[in-house]
Image (spheres, rainbow, N blue to C red):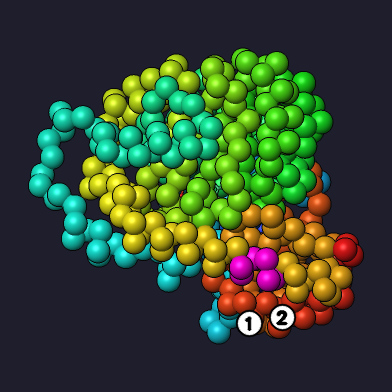
Amino acid sequence: MSCLRAIGNTIHYDTVIVLGQFSGTTAVRIAASVEAEIRDGHLPPGAQLPPIRALATELGVSPMTVASAYREVGRRGLVVAAGRRGTRVADRPPLPVRTRIFVPQGTRDLATGNPDAELLPSLADALGRIDTSRRLALEEGKLPALVELAAERFAADGITTSGVAVVGGALDGIERALLAHLRPGDRVAVEDAGFVRAYDLVRPLGLDLEPFRLDDLGPRPDELDRALERGARAVILTPRAQNPTGAAIDAKRARELRDLLTAREDVLVIEDDHADGVAGSPAFTVCDPGRPNWATVRSVSKSLGPDLRVALLAGDATTLSRVEGRQLIGPGWVSRILQQIVVTFWSDPAARELLAQAERTYTARRVRLLHELTERGIRAHGRSGLNVWIPVRDESAAVAALLQRGWAVTGLERWRLRSEAAIRITTATLDVEEAGPLADDVAAALETRAGTYSA
Ligand SMILES: Cc1ncc(COP(=O)(O)O)c(C=O)c1O
């Protein structure tokens, strides 16, 4: 049994693991037993695997056999090699197990990263207005009205697309774009710090992560250049509302990145515009009109609600046709009921005003917390979106100290590859009146072992 400690939303597992729970004398059998332990919930997301040598001794096999078993489960995205921190179970292993976000009762949840339910437009109203007659499979999968509205919205932001695909959320779109171009063993440049679910999406596809660093204006050109020099065949970047840092690309940075990427037309560029509509920052694209190999995915998860599972994908003709062709022989299309709901929200002036109001509210909440933190000498970031990012010396200590004061926030151990330790505070539901007391508690928490880098 692993020894479990819960700190904030992060579940920690001491590395004391009874080795007897693993079995097998071949790499295939050992890999199967690791998979079974994960599937059965004995090894939850984030749990540490035993050191290779210890397990080899226990099972009476060579360390190479265990290393080969770990490589196999790593290839399938079940576990992640974390350098000196050993090997641990992925945050989202591709098995039907769930990451447990642990928010103790009575604690203010600023960890789960969702939009504010109070700021989402009413689904009941939209459902009352859509055509619910049964649709047949052979009809057009995409709603022309949705495609038209999406194309207008892309065009308004200078994104010239040869069409629009409708996919089941941002991550679905990203996965489909990657599969349209890449092969196992290819490298993908990813943001560091970055969205942990994107990391966990890429690994089981057999793709290797090549991290690049950010600043408040998004990907640093020198860093992205280096990642591409190291052979990355694709890049996934978040143009605004970057999760967890809140970075947002401005016009100048977009130009710099576009220049860099135009010189590398063979690289697939994927823009994850997951918070379109509520990002609190304008959209800039790094893809030149006419560029081959690109996709911009816009999800409605943050603006209209994560349960809609709808995103719109712009791109070049080849990428679009591959994505749509593959989708057609799999799920076929995204439910037209859901597509109609999006059309209803996007075309109703009252719903549009509500969304604009939601965006202003998110911005006010984030900006207020940043202001209060800066006043207390704490270096914090969050140019856009629903999160504030604070570098700290010790993530677990910071999360624990804030939890003691009644705030559940996210420690970012798993959200970074080489970048510094940090915590994420989701401000989506943070009342502006709470920002001062929260900033006091952050200041107090960071005076402990958690530490901080001053402003
Ligand atoms: C950067 C980023 N991309 C994608 C998503 C998820 O989008 P979707 O629900 O459309 O898959 C999130 C959700 O928080 C996110 O933070």
Q: Position of residue 237 (x, y in %)?
A: 63, 37
Give the position of the N terminus as an image quadrant: bottom right
* Disc sitting over residue 196 in the figure: none
Badge 2 vs badge 1, beta-carbon distance below 8 Å: yes
User: Badge 1 is on which residue?
Assistant: 433
User: Badge 2 is on which residue?
Assistant: 436
| Residue in the image at 12% along x and 35% along y | 136
User: In the picture, residue 30 is in which quadrant?
Assistant: top right
- Residue flagged by tag 1: what amino acid is it? Glu
Label 1: which secondary element: helix
Q: How far, Cα to Cα, is label 2 from label 1?
A: 7 Å
- Residue flagged by tag 2: what amino acid is it? Gly
- In the image, taking residue 132 as reference, residue 453 lies left or right, namely right
Query: Is residue 15 placed above or below 439 in the rendered structure?
Result: above
Decide whether the magenta segment is chiefly helix, strand or loop: helix
Q: Is residue 181 visible in the rendered structure shown here?
A: yes
Furthest residue toward right? 454
- In the image, taking residue 274 as reference, residue 211 lies left or right, namely right
User: In the picture, residue 189 is in which quadrant?
Assistant: top right
Q: Position of residue 442 (x, y in %)?
A: 76, 75
| Residue in the image at 28% along x and 52% along y | 344
Q: Is residue 21 visible in the rendered structure shown here?
A: no
Q: Position of residue 362 (x, y in %)?
A: 56, 64
Label 2: which secondary element: helix
Query: Is residue 127 placed above or below 318 in the rendered structure?
Result: below
Magenta part of the chain? 364-369
